Image: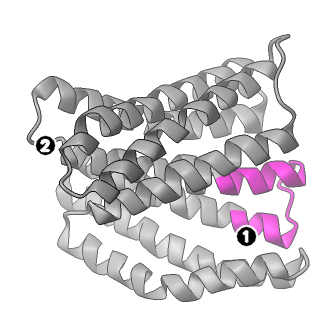
Amino acid sequence: MVPLTGRRALRVLRIARILQPAGALAAILAFVAPKGVPAGALALGWFAVCAIAGIAGILELAEARSLRPEHLLPAAALGFLAVGGAWLVASRSGTSLGYSAPIVELTAVHFHYAGFAATIMSAVAFRAMRDRPRRLRLGSATAGLLVVIATPLTATGIATGTAALTVIGPVLLAIGILGTAALTALVIAPALPKPTARWLLIISAAGIVIPMLLGVDYAAGRVLPIPALDLGTMALVHGTLNAVVYSLLGLAGWSLA
């Protein structure tokens, strides 16, 4: 589904696709094994897939010689996947990198979902808007670029504890993801001929509203005296809705479309 255009980039991405099932199995086994060197070694199998995909993203930008959204969005998504795979290795091997274990694990999770999955859906949404009026294409591009910018900003805010970035990153991320979701539900999905694809995308778009609002509230609650959910509840509610409803149903809808 990654809308690459470069010939070499597509060739390298094909390698990642071929290796993906083995990498996925390695990732599952990495969670079955006790945290430590063996689990980290297993996670390297998934990181290999992510790293190859990341190289495809770099080749896309090199071949296109452009940072236009149609090239930058899919390339950034693959880059985020590579970063997420690296953090997964750190998490399963028990490498703290100076942070608590939950932060290392959740960083891996966020680069897979808020980074990779959300940016991929921004990329395919932008591609689907190619025949739409210019203002809609501009809105789609802006939403996608906000996701690209906000993902590392959010990670930096968590890593450094900088109050401004801790709030600004999640706010920009929420605006970007909700913008893409709104365009998908209101503009793209109604025009799709397949009812199943249409409804999967609409449900996906509706399902991301609460997780994004909770994410902003949680981030703001880290630096401001406002009520927010605890980390465990956030993982259960925000994480599950983001992963299962927005990402899984959304990617399934785009695949059918």
Residue 93 within the magenta-colored segment of the rendering = yes
Q: Is residue 74 above or below residue 122?
A: below
Depth check, front residue: 192 or 156: 192
Q: Is residue 210 left or right of residue 139?
A: right
Task: Name the residue located 80 percent from the left edge and 17 percent from the top edge.
Answer: 223
Task: Please tell me how crowded label 1 is: few (under 14), some (14-19), or many (20+) other residues with Cα within 10 Å.
Answer: many
Task: Name the residue located 33 percent from the left edge and 58 percent from the top edge.
Answer: 196
Task: Please tell me how crowded label 2 is: few (under 14), some (14-19), or many (20+) other residues with Cα within 10 Å.
Answer: few
- Highlighted magenta segment, given as a residue range: 88-109
Determine whether the residue tagged by mark 1 lies in a helix, strand or loop. Answer: helix
Q: Is residue 225 left or right of residue 61?
A: right
Determine whether the residue tagged by mark 2 lies in a helix, strand or loop. Answer: loop
Q: What residue would you read off at disc 2?
A: 130
Q: What residue would you read off at disc 1?
A: 89
Which corner quadrant holds the C terminus? Answer: bottom left
Residue type at mark 2 is Arg
